[in-house]
Image (cartoon, coloured by chain):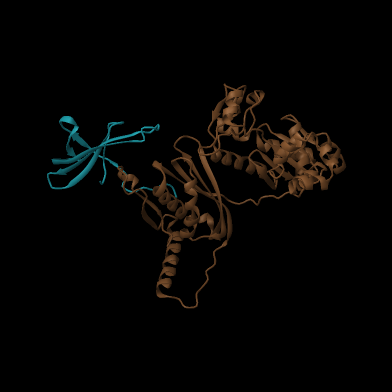
Amino acid sequence: MGSRTLNLPRPARVRMGAGGVPREVDGRRIEQVRESWLVEDRWWTGRPLRRRYWEVVSTRGRDLVVFHDLGTGEWFAQAG
Amino acid sequence: MVVCVHLPRFELIVAAGGAEALAGRARAIAPAPGSEARVGEVSGAAEAFGVTRGMALGEALARCPELRLAAGDPLGVAREWERVARALEGIGAALELARAGLAYFGSDGLRGLHGGDEGVIAAARRALGRPARVGAGPTRFCALAAALEVRSRRAAIVGEETQARRYLASRPVALLGYRAQTAALVEPLTRLGVRTLGELAALGRDAMADRFGAPGALAWRLARGEDDPLCTRSVEDCLEESLELWEAGSGLALERVLGVLVDRLLARPQRCGRTLRALTLSAQLVEGGTWRERVVLREALSDPRRVRLALAPRLALLPAPATELRLAAERFGPPEGAQGSLLESGCELQRARLRGAVAQMRVAAGPEAVLRALCVDPDSRVPERRVVLTPFTG
């Protein structure tokens, strides 16, 4: 069997506000940003990884983790 | 008749990325990280400057300032050499692999198939599909001497044993360097003024054994055209599993990855219940180049815990952090037997039932039917690197 990893990122529709802060994730309005962190890795290889993670809470009280791929500009959702 | 196939500078060609990269350029294989600073195989242009294999790196660079070093690629060499071996086995040859770039096989059983010794050699060349030096003789040492003497597109065939003795008499003692047991004799023999194999044979067996021990006696036999029979390998499937490491791995993280690879290898249906006898652990290094370590188990095993215990200490030999780890089963033992115990405990009985259920699930729904989640890098900042799915081994 090939390499199977759990918790792979899945594409998400995110509407950004000022400073790149998520305002809406997959149609859910965001109430609060709990935390944000930057991950930069494998910069010494041909496939560098640059992500800005956001942990946010929706207006219905759901905790979500999304990240902005700084290389491609796409957004993904992922369990933290 | 023994046929020798010699692919000169095989390791260097693989490490440099092709024979074209060596044309007219002084190249050599760089010393492996953590090992003695001596160069590996060298190109013809480097040899023209007096650089030889095994020379100290400082001396090599002093003799040839233009010398460019290529990182050794033992993994790539092993893969490419296996491809060459499989191609030769495709014509029906039972191979003895002396080292990467040097192989022998007997032509007696193949003459009828390919039309004489010339036909066998032509078939071998077609199978190789690349320039190679090919020679044939009554012994492998004689075949090697013939192969080293001819050009790439021709073949030399030495006939009878008496003819072989005459043929070898005028060859240099440097030929002994191609045999691991006698390689150390080349330098002292040259210093003693023994230049040809004929002069060596004239010294007599007792004198050679007295001065050099068993390697001396073997060298005398080789010089007289005598040799041991070929020791051919049996053709077996090679099962391989690999896992790319997100972060340059070492230590505990690497041991966890090894555990995943062992589980995967043991779950492969192609194993057919056979135990593992010899394994190859290899890695792609973060600094470039590769690392390879062959592990022959003291007894054939199929218990994942014991296989892991046997392999884990080898990870400490890695010269640099790895970006990819590979595990291949090269040789297999007999199928594992189910030995019942006199007093079966309830726990053991339950475990045996579980193993049976897992086996049945795999037969019914494929090898990925029963998996377990294994933490390989629980502290990684990137969530998808923390847990992988690996076959459940009971």
Extreme residue in the right direction: B162
- The residue located at (47%, 55%) in the rendering is B308
Q: Quadrant of residue B53?
A: top right
- The residue located at (84%, 40%) in the rendering is B164
Extreme residue in the bottom direction: B343
Q: Work out whether residue B360 can be spotted.
A: yes
Q: Looking at the picture, how far across and down is residue B29, in whole percent?
A: 57, 32
Which residue is nearer to you in this view: A55 or B112? Answer: A55
Which residue is nearer to you in this view: B365 or B64? Answer: B64
Vertical comparison of B141 with B262: above or below: above
**Which chain is the one coloured cyan?**
A
Q: Looking at the picture, how far across and down is residue A48, in whole percent?
A: 35, 33
**Which chain is the one coloured brown?**
B
Q: Quadrant of residue B127?
A: top right
Q: Quadrant of residue B102?
A: top right
Vertical comparison of B18 with B360: above or below: above
**Residue B262 horizontal side relative to residue A19, left or right:** right
Q: Looking at the picture, how far across and down is residue B163, in whole percent?
A: 86, 39
